[in-house]
C-alpha cells in the first residue's frame, strides 16, 4: 500500500474521486441523521457504515427497520444482486491478482468507485488496482466522515434542502456519458430510462434499479456488437 | 434480532455479493454473457441517474431534477462529457430552476 502513494494511477484515482468524496460525504450525513432518527445509537450508525459501505443497502435497512429483519434482508439481497455483474466485470478489468488484493477491492465495490474504475479502464489507466484503491479510500473516508457528522451533529442539517438525490443522479449521468459511443450504447440508454420509469411504477424500490438495469443490459446484449 | 446483529448480517450479505466473481479468477465470459457484462455498467448508471433526476418519492415526476438532467446533458455537450462539466452545469440549472419555481 505504501508503494502505491507514488504511483501515477493512484494519484489519478485520488484526483478523480475528490468530487465523489464530497457527494458521498453529503449522502453519509443524510444516512447518519436518518439512522439515529430510527433508533440507532450514533456509534451503531457509524459502525454500520464501517462494515457495510453501501448507501443503497443502508438506507433500505433503516427504511425497513420497523417492518422487521426479513424485509430488510430481502431488500438488501435484492440490492446486492447488482454487485454480481459489477464483480464479474471488475475481475475482468483487473486481470490476475493476489487473493488478498481481490478481497480488498471487493470490500468497497460500490457504484461510484466501480464507475470510476470502468471509466479509468476505458481511458487506459495503467494500474487499475492502484487507481481503484485510491478511489476506495477516498470514498470510504467520505462515507465514514459524513455518517459521523450526521449521527452526532445531524439534527441541524436538512439533506433535502441540498438536493442530494439530484446531485447523485447527475454524478451517475456524468459516469455514464463517456460510455456512450456506439449505436448499441444508445439503445441501452433508451432501454434503461424506459425500464426504470416502468419499474418505478410497478416494482418495490428495492428492485427497481436492479431489474431495470438488467432488462436494459439484456436488450443491449441482444442488439449485438 | 438485535440491531447490531442485523447490521452484521447485512454487511455479510453485501460483501458476499461483491466478492462473488472476485474470490476466484474465472474465464472471461464471451458471447451474449460478455456483451451483457459490457453494457451492464451503462445500463446501471443510467437507471440510477433516472431515479435521481426523473422521479420524486418513487414515481416519475416533473421536478427541478429534470432541469438538472437537461443541464447535465448540456454540460456534457459543452465540456466534452467531462464529469465536472456535467455536474457543474446540471447543478447550476437545478438550483436556478428550484429557486424560481420553489
Image (spheres, coloured by chain):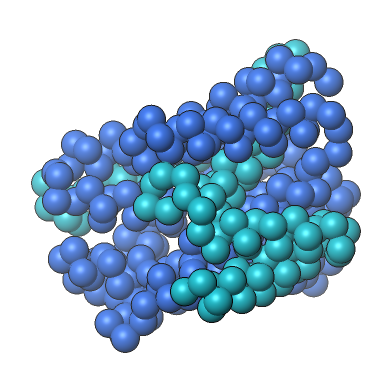
Chain colours: A blue, B cyan
Closer to the camera in the image, B29 or B33:
B33
Q: Can you see residue A117?
A: no
- Picture quadrant of residue A44: bottom left
Hey, which residue is sitting farthest front in the picture?
B101
Residue A1, position in %: x, y?
66, 64
Q: Can you see residue A119?
A: yes
Q: Residue visible at 37% across and 52% down?
A: B57
Q: From this view, report whether residue A224 is shown above or below residue A167.
A: above
Q: From this view, report whether residue B15 is shown above or below residue B102.
A: above
Q: Residue visible at 55% across and 63% down?
A: B64
Closer to the camera in the image, A89 or A175:
A175
Q: From this view, report whether residue A120 is shown above or below residue A222.
A: below
Q: Residue visible at 26% across and 53% down?
A: A63
- Picture quadrant of residue A183: top right
Q: Residue visible at 32% across and 49% down?
A: A60
Residue B99, position in %: x, y?
54, 78
A124 left or right of A223 in image: right
Residue A50, position in %: x, y?
39, 63
A77 left or right of A40 in image: right
Amino acid at each position: 500500500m505504501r508503494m502505491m502513494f507514488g504511483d501515477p494511477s493512484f494519484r489519478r484515482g485520488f484526483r478523480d474521486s475528490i468530487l465523489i468524496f464530497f457527494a458521498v460525504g453529503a449522502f453519509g450525513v443524510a444516512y447518519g441523521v436518518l439512522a439515529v432518527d430510527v433508533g440507532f445509537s450514533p456509534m451503531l450508525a457509524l459502525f454500520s457504515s464501517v462494515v457495510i459501505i453501501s448507501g443503497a443497502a443502508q438506507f433500505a435497512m433503516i427504511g425497513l427497520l420497523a417492518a422487521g429483519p426479513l424485509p430488510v434482508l430481502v431488500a438488501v439481497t435484492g440490492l446486492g444482486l447488482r454487485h454480481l455483474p459489477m464483480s464479474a466485470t471488475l475481475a475482468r478489468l483487473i486481470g490476475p491478482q493476489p487473493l488478498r488484493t481481490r478481497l480488498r477491492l471487493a470490500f468497497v465495490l460500490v457504484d461510484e468507485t466501480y464507475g470510476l474504475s470502468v471509466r479509468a479502464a476505458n481511458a487506459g489507466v495503467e494500474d487499475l488496482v492502484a487507481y481503484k484503491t485510491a478511489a476506495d479510500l477516498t470514498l470510504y473516508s467520505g462515507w465514514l466522515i459524513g455518517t459521523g457528522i450526521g449521527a452526532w451533529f445531524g439534527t441541524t442539517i436538512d439533506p433535502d434542502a441540498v438536493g442530494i438525490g439530484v446531485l447523485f443522479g447527475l454524478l451517475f449521468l456524468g459516469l455514464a456519458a463517456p460510455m456512450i459511443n456506439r449505436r448499441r450504447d444508445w439503445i441501452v440508454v433508451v432501454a434503461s430510462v424506459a425500464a426504470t420509469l416502468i419499474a418505478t411504477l410497478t416494482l418495490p424500490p428495492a428492485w427497481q434499479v436492479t431489474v431495470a438495469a438488467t432488462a436494459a443490459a439484456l436488450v443491449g446484449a441482444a442488439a449485438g456488437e | 434480532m438485535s440491531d447490531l446483529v442485523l447490521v452484521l448480517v447485512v454487511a455479510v450479505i453485501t460483501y458476499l455479493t461483491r466478492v462473488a466473481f472476485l474470490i476466484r479468477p474465472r474465464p472471461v465470459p464471451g458471447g451474449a454473457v460478455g456483451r451483457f457484462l459490457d453494457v451492464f455498467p451503462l445500463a446501471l448508471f443510467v437507471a440510477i441517474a433516472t431515479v435521481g433526476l426523473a422521479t420524486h418519492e418513487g414515481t416519475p415526476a416533473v421536478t427541478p431534477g429534470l432541469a438538472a438532467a437537461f443541464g447535465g446533458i448540456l454540460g456534457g455537450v459543452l465540456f466534452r462529457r467531462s464529469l465536472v462539466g456535467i455536474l457543474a452545469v446540471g447543478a447550476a440549472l437545478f438550483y436556478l430552476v428550484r429557486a424560481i419555481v420553489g
